[in-house]
Amino acid sequence: MPERTSSGFGRLLITVYGIFALSATARAGVQIATRFSEAPLPYLLSALAGVVYILATIGLARRGPGARRLAWGAVGFELAGVLVVGLLSVFDAGDFPDDTVWSDFGRGYGFIPLVLPLVGLWWLRRTRAG
């Protein structure tokens, strides 16, 4: 029988996703509320990252096929977001007057945003049924 996504190593993964959900959402909330006009694109992208981290946390923490689909979708979207925003922030820095969670592939967060979806996808694959 495969391991549940929320047991063992999954608990650590859920904790890290939860921390990122809280920090990205709080960061975006403060930025949007206090200085949105300075860098609307980066701040909205940070808010999007926060929502994605929330969805990934929920998907990984819950049981069932619906939760698994949610986790796969959120973590896959997260990886695509980190790669696209990372590339854009490197090659078109003018659109990014301030950093997002995913800018420069998550450099401001120790590149954890780049590694986290890879680990998340590995964990989802490892714990799949059959």
Image (tube, helix red, strand yellow):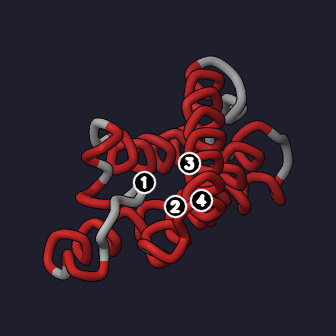
Label 1: few (<14), some (14–19) or many (≥20) C-alpha neighbours in 10 Å: many
Q: Nearer the viewer, residue 41 or 53?
A: 41
Q: Residue furthest top?
A: 8
Which residue matches tag 3?
27
Percent x, y of residue 72: 61, 59
Percent x, y of residue 59: 74, 49
Q: Nearer the viewer, residue 55 or 100?
A: 100
Q: Are marks 4 and 1 in contact (CB under 8 Å)?
A: no
Q: CA distance from mark 2 to mark 1?
A: 5 Å
Q: Note whether residue 75 is visible.
A: yes
As helix, strand or loop, the secondary structure at mark 4 comes to helix
As helix, strand or loop, the secondary structure at mark 3 comes to helix
Amino acid at dot 3: Arg
* Label ID, residue 34: 4
Q: Quadrant of residue 82?
A: bottom left
Q: CA distance from mark 3 to mark 2?
A: 8 Å
Relative to 66, is 128 on the left or the right? left
For image coordinates 51% across by 61% down, the residue present is: 46
As helix, strand or loop, the secondary structure at mark 1 comes to loop
Q: CA distance from mark 1 to mark 3?
A: 9 Å
Label 3: few (<14), some (14–19) or many (≥20) C-alpha neighbours in 10 Å: some
Which residue matches tag 1?
101
